């Protein structure tokens, strides 16, 4: 299972906010932001903080990408 956070990056652009500003607002490390950039799993606590700061729902910042079928 993988996740895409493209919606998050678009929302940040729409709100005129940088990744570093988001990192500071959610009191997170740069490695957490890097994980988001790579589509890696982060804690629900981080996702919740992001939603609170950006005043949005989970579906506004991320989407689940199903696993590719195995042959």
Image (cartoon, rainbow, N blue to C red):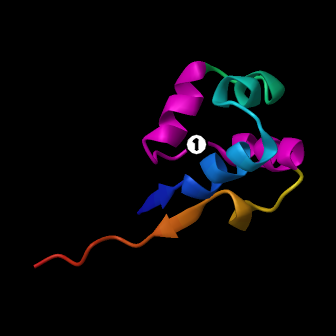
Q: Taking 16 as reference, is 55 above or below it?
A: below
Residue at horizontal 17 percent and vertical 76 percent from the top: 70
Specify whether residue 46 is painted magenta. Answer: yes
Q: Taking 11 as reference, is 53 above or below it?
A: above
Residue 41 on image: x %, y %: 51, 47
Q: Is residue 67 visible?
A: yes
Of the 4 image quadrants, the one containing the C terminus is: bottom left
Specify whether residue 47 is painted magenta. Answer: yes
Q: What stretch of residues is rendered in magenta? A: 30-54
Res. 33 image quadrant:
top right
Task: Classify mark 1: residues with Cα within 10 Å, few (<14), some (14-19) or many (20+).
Answer: few
| Residue hosting label 1 | 42
Of the 4 image quadrants, the one containing the N terminus is: bottom left
Res. 58 image quadrant:
bottom right
Residue at horizontal 88 percent and vertical 46 percent from the top: 52
Residue 56 on image: x %, y %: 84, 58
Residue at horizontal 84 percent and vertical 47 percent from the top: 54
Residue 66 on image: x %, y %: 40, 73
Q: Taking 24 as reference, is 65 above or below it?
A: below
Residue 42 on image: x %, y %: 58, 42
Image position of 50 (left or right of 9)? right
């Amino acid at each position: 299972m993988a996740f895409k956070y493209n919606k998050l990056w678009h929302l940040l652009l729409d709100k005129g906010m940088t990744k570093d500003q988001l990192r500071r607002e959610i009191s997170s490390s740069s490695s957490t932001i890097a994980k988001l950039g790579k589509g890696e799993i982060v804690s629900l606590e981080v996702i919740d903080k992001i939603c609170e700061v950006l005043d949005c729902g989970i579906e506004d910042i991320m989407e689940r990408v199903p696993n590719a079928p195995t042959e």
